[in-house]
Amino acid sequence: MEDTLSPNAVKVYRAMKDLNYLGEEKMGTAERITQTSKLPKNMALNALQELQTKGLARRKVREKSAGYYLVLT
């Protein structure tokens, strides 16, 4: 799977896995994912978008900020 992702998407994927964002009840913010992946915010957001496009992550709109979580681990 990691061979089909960009290097930044792999970093974000691993960061989300390390943070245990593995389901809707355990989702986190883009800010926290950005801090953990140590990528600039725009690169982390692009990587999150790539993960969503490939069906590996989902985004859920909440009141204050969107939450992200992995679908496949």
Image (cartoon, rainbow, N blue to C red):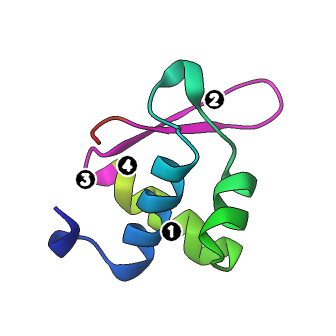
Mark earlier in primary sequence (1, 4): 1
Q: Amino acid at mark 2?
A: Val
Q: Which residue is mark 2?
A: 61
* Number of other residues with Cα within 10 Å of mark 2, as a class: few under 14, some 14 to 19, many 20 or more: few
* Number of other residues with Cα within 10 Å of mark 1, as a class: few under 14, some 14 to 19, many 20 or more: some
- Residue 58 inside the magenta-drawn segment: yes
Q: CA distance from mark 3 to mark 2?
A: 19 Å
Element type at mark 3: loop
- Magenta segment range? 53-70
* Number of other residues with Cα within 10 Å of mark 3, as a class: few under 14, some 14 to 19, many 20 or more: few
* Number of other residues with Cα within 10 Å of mark 4, as a class: few under 14, some 14 to 19, many 20 or more: some
Is 22 situated left or right of 39 in this image? left
Whether residue 50 is situated above or below residue 7 in the rendered picture = above
- Residue 57 at x, y = what percent? 39, 43
Mark earlier in primary sequence (1, 2): 1
Is 6 situated left or right of 3 in this image? right
Q: Name the residue rendered at 22%, 68% in the picture.
A: 2
Q: Name the residue rendered at 76%, 37% in the picture.
A: 65
Element type at mark 1: helix
Is disc 4 in contact with disc 3, using a CB cutoff of under 8 Å?
yes
Which mark identifies residue 52?
4
